[in-house]
Amino acid sequence: MHRPALSVVVPCYNEAACLDLLHARISGAAQSAVGEDYEIVLINDGSRDDSWSVMQRLAAADPRLVAINLSRNHGHQLALTAGLDLCAGEQILIIDADLQDPPELLPQMRAAMAEQQADVVYAVRRQRAGETVFKKATAAAFYRLLTKMTDTPIPVDTGDFRLMSRRALDAFLSLPEQARFIRGMVAWIGFRQIPFAYDRAERHAGETNYPLAKMMRLAFDAVTGFSTAPLRFASHAGLALTGVSLLLFVYIAIGWLSGSAVQGWTSTMLVTVFLGAVQMFVLGMIGEYLGRLYVESKRRPLYIVADIAGPIQGKATLGF
Ligand code: UDP
Ligand code: MG
């Protein structure tokens, strides 16, 4: 198997309008970094536009391009996993298809990696052009909350745009979980990881494939994958409520002794409703973890490949 010096891995969902420019810009950046010794791995994550036919055309014209067609939309994190699994490079650049992350930063990222002998150079967003205030605010709040809840040093304001060494990637690929929060998993493997600040551009074309619902799913995967704090919250809340109910008991006892009992419909209702709410919340939290346990226990492959266009250098067995 030939190991190119560099693999550039790009998950794509409905990105037909970006692919030509993406291919040109990545090729330029890769050539200036490693000459001809690179491969570009595009993953078509069940796009509903003509991304796959554009990829096939590009693959036919460029021997350095491999296009992988997943059998359906598996989601960003699994599409990326497929590409990482199948790429062969000594260094691996992960980048989005919409050109929000400039491929031209590659030489600087490689220089930083060599200088500081790092295994991972992760890009940190200084600015995010063309994204809504809501998206920026929720993302900022989420990353800060997540850092508080987990012992894994997950960097804030970081996407999946990063350069990795082969040994870091191999370590990453040994993590088998289904619910994948890749930037957290990469942080978990350790080695020397350094930040690289950049300004995030606007999408070249199309619109975000991360609506609120998908963002929330990723957030839940991140929290439940990297923290048991919510489960602990359940026991802490239970403890606190026991304290409160002891106080209530004293209050009720005093009322009973002084003969002014009965009435109290309001307080009874309040307590019932409050306890009900807390119990539902705690049960829901347990359900979140249980659901993930269930999904993991099925041990399904992470993705299914339908077609491959172009020469594949990496392993040809697909899935885990
Ligand atoms: N993507 C994917 N599958 C999906 C959703 C997104 O492969 O189900 C890809 C998408 O093509 C892009 C990257 O993941 O290359 C990031 O998605 P997007 O740009 O929509 O997210 P945002 O930058 O808005 O967070
Ligand atoms: Mg984007």
Image: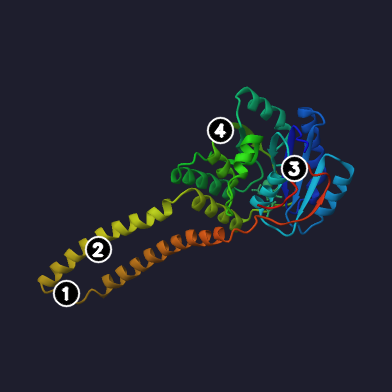
Instruction: Point out the frontmost of discs 1 and 4.
Output: 4
Spot the residue most to the left: 258
- Where, by quadrant of the figure, is residue 267 drawn? bottom left
Image label count:
4
- Three-letter residue code for mark 3: Gly
**Label located before the other in sequence (4 or 3):** 4
- Where, by quadrant of the figure, is residue 275 drawn? bottom left
Q: Between marks 3 and 2, how big is the CA–CA gap?
A: 61 Å
Q: Which residue is mark 1?
A: 261
Of residues 106 and 179, the one nearer the viewer is 179
Instruction: Point out the frontmost of discs 1 and 3.
Output: 3
Vertical position of residue 54 compared to residue 274: above or below: above
Instruction: Point out the frontmost of discs 4 and 3.
Output: 3
Can residue 156 be seen at all in this image of the molecule? no
Residue at x-position 57% and y-position 50%: 134
Q: Which residue is mark 3?
A: 314
Q: Which residue is mark 2?
A: 245
Q: Which residue is mark 4?
A: 191
